[in-house]
Amino acid sequence: MLITKDLQEIRNAGNPGGFDYKRYALFNGITHQVYLTHKDYYQLPGNDLPWYRSWLLQTRNYVLKAIKSHIKGTKEQGLAEAMLIGYKDDLDKSLLQSYTNTGVVHVIAVSGMHLALLYWLLNLLFAPLLRKKRTQWLHAVLVLTLLWFFSFITGGAASIVRAA
């Protein structure tokens, strides 16, 4: 992988008595970091992804295209992408800073509550399968499969995986 940005030395947040992240990273053999967007790096050929990861990325890109085609405005698209599937690359930086300053940045984080809402919707959608004893197992399989699929599409955030 080729990157176009320079590495930055890891620094602490500057909170006296706070967690010393620089020291923690040093003990783990990490001294520098860099924050990249999809425009800041180039993937070299020859390092193919496994089929399932490629399929998950294609599915996520399909969802992103659907959001972009149905929601007008770049700020609105970025916010919808962040709130629905946790994709924050297109999120407006000033909007993110505003959410951070007001203390409501957790609103745009995909969490277990998203998974709970999806579970409720899937349970409602597949409720007819619960009427017959022969198809009750199919209800559980479909709901669990789709919940884990959503977990992987969102990038496998800790809060989502824990809830799944």
Image: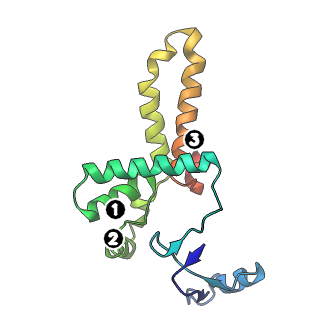
Helix, strand or loop under label 2: loop
Q: Is residue 54 above or below residue 140?
A: below
- Give how far across and how far down residue 54 sits, in percent: 57, 50
| Amino acid beneath label 3 | Trp
The front one of 7 and 155 is 7
Tag 2–tag 1 contact (CB < 8 Å): yes
- Give how far across and how far down residue 116 sits, in percent: 48, 41
Q: Which mark is residue 44?
A: none
| Amino acid beneath label 1 | Gly
- Can residue 20 be seen at all in this image of the molecule? no
Q: Is residue 49 above or below residue 39?
A: above
The front one of 158 and 85 is 85
User: How is colour applied across the structure in the image?
Assistant: rainbow
Q: How many marks?
A: 3
Q: Is residue 38 left or right of residue 164?
A: left
Q: Residues within 10 Å of mark 3 (few under 14, many from 20)?
A: some
The front one of 22 and 63 is 63
The front one of 61 and 152 is 61
Residue at 58 percent across and 25 percent down: it is: 140
| Amino acid beneath label 2 | Asp
Residue at 57 percent across and 16 percent down: it is: 136
**Cα–Cα gap, marks 3 and 2:** 28 Å
- Give how far across and how far down residue 39 sits, in percent: 44, 72
**Cα–Cα gap, marks 3 and 1:** 24 Å
Q: Which mark is residue 78?
A: 1
**Cα–Cα gap, marks 2 and 1:** 7 Å
Quadrant of image for the N terminus? bottom right
Residue linked to disc 3:
148
Residue linked to disc 2:
92
